[in-house]
Image (cartoon, grey):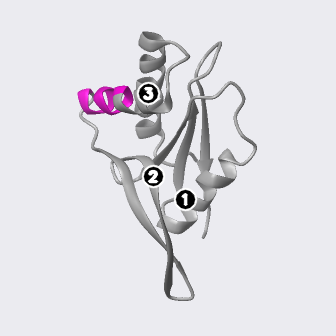
Amino acid sequence: MLRDEELTYRIRGCIFEVYRQLGHGFLESVYQKALITELQSQRLTVQAEHPVTIFYKGQDVGLFRLDLVVENRVIIELKAQKVLPQGAEAQLINYLKATGMKLGLLANFTYPKAFVKRVILENQ
């Protein structure tokens, strides 16, 4: 059974609409702003650059920022690169672990089409 299937379907639709309108070749920050606009137009709540503190044995060891969080349930990691970096999926998995969230989408605005990969963290 898919987790939050309807929500991720709507998010994917927003990602592909942004790509349809803008195409490839822009910076990640442009796609991020456009995607925020599209998600909000679909009445979805979205947080950009959401800060998350990393703890190690109870001590604060760092801070990172999530590209987007939708409906407080789905992390979206955005890329705008010809070739997706090898560590991109691992990065999203680490974000899921650090936040306790279970579902993320890795979106790359690339040529010839946008790419979206669903990442689920089970039983962590």
Helix, strand or loop status at disc 3: helix
Q: Is residue 112 left or right of residue 107?
A: right
Q: Are marks 3 and 1 in contact (CB under 8 Å)?
A: no
Magenta stretch: dominant SS? helix
Q: CA distance from mark 1 to mark 2?
A: 8 Å
Residue at figure coordinates x 48%, y 17% from the top left: 19
Residue position for label 1: 95
Q: Nearer the viewer, mark 3 or mark 1?
A: 3
Quick one: label 2, few (<14), some, or many (20+) residues within 10 Å?
A: some
Q: Which region of the structure is painted magenta?
A: 34-41
What label sits on residue 31 in the rendered view? 3
Q: Nearer the viewer, residue 60 or 89?
A: 60
**Which residue type carries mark 1?**
Tyr
Tell me which amino acid carries mark 2: Leu
In magenta segment, residue 124: no
**Residue marked by disc 2:** 66
- In depth, the one of 74 and 24 nearer the eye is 24
Answer few, some or many: residues within 10 Å of disc 1's Cα (few below 14, many 20 plus, some between 14 and 19): many
| Marks 1 and 2 close (CB-CB < 8 Å) | yes
Q: Residue at x 39, y 60 (%)?
A: 51
Relative to 122, is 66 above or below? above
Looking at the image, residue 60 sits to the left or right of residue 38; the answer is right
Sequence-wise, the earlier of marks 3 and 1 is 3
Where residue 115 appears, as percent x and y from the top left, is 61, 27
The percent position of residue 99, horizontal first and vertical second, equals 47, 65
